Image (tube, rainbow, N blue to C red):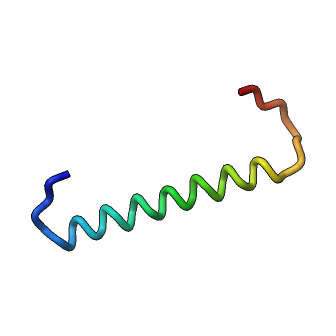
Amino acid sequence: MTASVPGLEAAATATNSAWSARVASFAASRSTAPSTRSVSG
């Protein structure tokens, strides 16, 4: 991404960080939660 606008770049970085955190949290909750369904893979 070659955005020349610092604000836009910062917003994109923040969004990516928030998304990564959400995905990590979801993965963690999935792995620690009791298995109520069969997950393959």
Left or right, 4 with reference to 28:
left
Seen at 89% across and 48% down, the residue is 34
Which residue occupies the extreme left position in the image?
Answer: 4
Q: Position of residue 10 (x, y in %)?
A: 28, 70
Left or right, 3 with reference to 41:
left
Q: Is residue 5 above or below residue 34?
A: below
Left or right, 36 with reference to 6:
right
* Quarter of the image where one finds residue 4: bottom left
* Quarter of the image where one finds residue 14: bottom left
Which of the pair 41/37 is nearer the observer?
41
Q: Position of residue 40 (x, y in %)?
A: 75, 26
Seen at 34% across and 64% down, the residue is 13
Q: Is residue 30 above or below residue 5?
A: above
Seen at 13% across and 68% down, the residue is 5
Q: Position of residue 27 (x, y in %)?
A: 67, 49
Left or right, 6 with reference to 32:
left
